[in-house]
Amino acid sequence: MLRRILPVCLILLSIISLAHAEKIKLTDIQLEGNDRVDSATIRAVLTVHSDKEVSLDDIDRDIQAIFKLGYFDDVTADLREEDKTKVLVFVVHERPLVREIRFDGIKKLTDEKLRPLTTIKPPEIYDPVKVKESIAALEDAYHTDGYYAVKVSTQLKTDERNESLLTFKIDEGKKILIDKIVFDGNQMIESDDLVDVMQTKKRWIWSWMTDRGTYKAEQIQIDLERIKALYYDHGYMDVRVKQPQISLIDDGKYMKLLIEIDEGQQYKVGRLRITGDLLKSRKELKDLLTLAEGDTFNRTELRNSVLALTDLYADQGYANVNVVPFTSKNVEEQTIDLKLEIEQGDLIHIEKIRISGNTITRDKVIRRELALVEGDLYSASKIKTSRRKLRNLGFFEDIGISTSAGSQRDLNQLDINVSEKPTGNFTIGAGYSSVDNFITQGSISQANFMGYGIRLNASATIGGASQLYSVSVTDPYFLDTRWSAGFELYKTEREWTDFSEDATGGAVKVGHPIGKYSRGLVLYRYEEKDTYDLTDSAIAAGIQDGPSTLSSVTGILSRNTTDYRLDPSRGGVSSFSAEYAGLGGTDKFAKFELSHRHFFPLFWKTVVSLNGNIKYVVKTTDTEIPDSEKFFLGGLRSIRGFRTREVGPKEGDTFIGGEKAAFFNLEFLFPLSEEYKLKGLFFADTGNAWRESENYFSDMRYSAGYGVRWLSPLGPLRFEWGYNLDPRDGEKSSVFEFSIGSFF
């Protein structure tokens, strides 16, 4: 306080001493008190000069100019007389030099994260403005992580050399999550619908694991725009969405957001016109639009209409087509007139396809997935198909497809830039299975061997009741043709409750695409098997003892329209197979299987999956169907909540398998962490296996449960808990299972 009063008093004294004169003629101007700040820096802002008359206003103006340099916390002007001359002395008091910055009280955030946020950088002269900016930046960082009750203060310790230690004292407080999101003024759109479009959500049971419920200022601004977009899609083009009001509730434990909305009036589509270069009649073009005259105006549907026209022209080779929407709002009639003006541009051919970014994958592996070749007319839909097929390879982290000018006006280059990801895995580990109890597992796989797209896999699984060894190779473009070819060798040893069996075999397969999404496959399988150590109940149930051989051929027709084969969100997978065993060997039968799984995207990136599977095996001679070829349901691949092979016909306590089987699965999948590719799910399963004499769908079994799926670097992992909804004697009420491999 004394420092602030002193300059005022000195100025008043100077005013009194100079009251008799309006102008003062100075003989010298001097500086005192500046140790670190160069005198030239101060003199550069002065307007008063020696040997010139100056006024009190001039001196006051220079005092303010020195203050504005930001280096001093006190500046005074002293008029002194020396040998009948007048000397003006500017006396400054320098702010301390900040030598070091420390943080006190941090636990939730790290020094490495906070230090770059401070705008004062040692060694630097202390600046209160920069300190205030630093405090705001530190608090914002805590707000982003949900610590909205954080308080930041500073402590400055200065030594005799006027050098300081600046400490930011941080009281982090508890993490405050959003518990309520409230809207005011929304009459036409329900609050639940508004919350649905926001990425910011209220806290939930998994908030300790995810960021849900955390207040993020940047995300809130995006959410406000999403709310506006929803209103625009309902015709409210004058809507105003205000910044959220934040308050703490439940004694500061949680946060409440209040968002005020002024909806305005609703608009409908008035006159709708299409002008410019028309490939088809106006009626045909209007039929492509998703907006019509009299409809409630919808900005998304306007965008979709523009895209529909653009895709039509782009699929005809007009790569540079420009569809410009013009809108005219009539406030009185509450209508918006639309004019879509089309400029088709030149007809474009693909001059050259250029591929970059592939350091491992061969160019031909990428080119053979493309729906376009050099010389083709440009086609937007074929480019989308190409992107989807490249993504489904699973070789690339990112795929960029763009066009650039060719050597002539009507030619374009197609530029494909990929970012490769590891396609080989070596895994070794241990785990638990409901069938084998503790197991050890190891595998070596490569999905893109030598960059040729050839898939190799070798694996071994050793459990308490089983051993499995397998090696497989598949070339999806055998000898650079559209034929696929591959083989598999395997050996299994398994101890079931009532018997044991060993099997050694292999398979050879060839396939070829049929149309855009379908594929045909022929597989030959040969297997030598031995069944032994039968219990009395197994013998009584008719389980076949001793060695046997299988020689069969299988035809498979499949169709896959999913958007991403590793983890689909839309589309379906269908398959029909027919196997005939009897090309030599002792086993004689015919087996048929039909399945379809479909994916439906819902809100918040959730997905519903429906799956159905029906099977039938029949004798082709008087030879009985081998027990290993009958149907035993239960487990991750059929009906969860039941142990593997423990759903189906029984003789006494022994499961004998059925000649008929069917099961159905309903799943609801939701994201837990997009960053870690982690999903949760709830499911319901039903099905059974039946003897030849029994009817399909009689005595259906039911289960339900939940699980977690992780698209990990080691491959897709499944952890699922199933509950038997009607346990019978000897059955568990729940079963936990996990697997490494595909999700379905």
Image (cartoon, grey):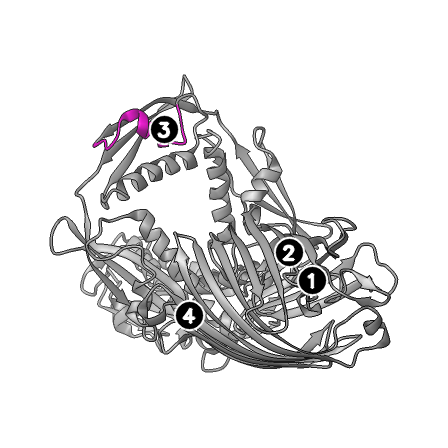
Q: Earlier in the sequence, mark 4 or mark 1?
A: 4
- Three-letter code, disc 2: Lys
Is residue 236 highlighted in magenta?
Answer: no
**Split into 4 quadrants, where in the image is the C terminus?**
bottom right
In the image, 639 versus 519, the foreground residue is: 519
Image quarter of residue 638:
bottom right
Do the numbered discs 3 and 4 sit on residues whose CB atoms are within 8 Å?
no
Q: Give me the disc on residue 74.
A: none
The image shows residue 738 at horizontal and vertical percentages of 66, 69
Give the extent of the magenta segment: 277-292
Q: Label 1 vs label 2: CA separation?
A: 8 Å
User: 115 or 45, which lies in front?
Assistant: 115
Left or right: where does residue 343 sit relative to residue 674?
left
**Residue drawn where x is 49% and y is 59% of the image:** 565
The image's mark for residue 631 is 1
What residue would you read off at disc 3? 287
Depicted 323 relative to depicted 580: above or below: above
User: Image quadrant of residue 728?
Assistant: bottom right
